[in-house]
Amino acid sequence: MTFEQEWAELRAAAAERTAMRIDSAPADGGVGGGRNDLVVNRDDLGAVGNDAYALLGRLTKEGDIARSSTLDAATALTNGNFVSGSAVLKVHDYWETHLKTLLDACAQISNHLDYSKAQHAKDEAKVEGDLKKISVLTEYMK
């Protein structure tokens, strides 16, 4: 077998493998036949993100009211020489710690959803670019 024959066979085999892997690229040079497989719309993430953001706002406002009221009660009980004042102050401290943790979690959820949408858009663009390169190589190999 000559080099030219072997080279022609290798090119044909490579073209066949490429065609099978990408399941034949569209003739118009587009990727995925006009549909984007990795698209994440705001509708997909928006409901959860909006809920997390709304919860963050409500928790910030109402949690602060509860924290402030508990502190006021603890102060009043302590000033009135009630032993339960120190216990209510501990409740205040626990509430404040857990509220901050919950507020951080809500903020992370909201931020992560925004990050995910942006990252999926970047991933889609990269995959689309890679498939266009493969499509060009496939045409070259023909």
Image (cartoon, rainbow, N blue to C red):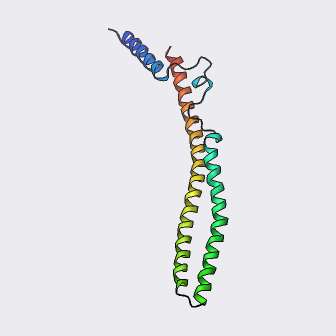
- Quarter occupied by residue 45: top right
Image: 69 above or below 110:
below
Image: 73 above or below 2:
below
From the viewer's side, name the closer residue of 20 and 114: 114
The residue sitting at the left extreme is 1
Residue drawn at x 58%, y 19% is 26
Q: Position of residue 53 (x, y in %)?
A: 64, 54
Q: Is residue 6 left or right of residue 43?
A: left
From the viewer's side, name the closer residue of 67 and 100: 67
Q: How many marks?
A: 0
Q: Position of residue 69 (x, y in %)?
A: 64, 75
From the viewer's side, name the closer residue of 75 and 15: 75
Residue drawn at x 52%, y 18% is 24
Q: Is residue 11 left or right of residue 52?
A: left
- Quarter occupied by residue 116: top right
- Quarter occupied by residue 117: top right
Q: Position of residue 135 (x, y in %)?
A: 54, 22
Q: Position of residue 103 (x, y in %)?
A: 58, 62
Residue drawn at x 40%, y 15% is 13
Residue drawn at x 59%, y 82% is 74
Q: Which quadrant would the N terminus be assigned to in this image? A: top left
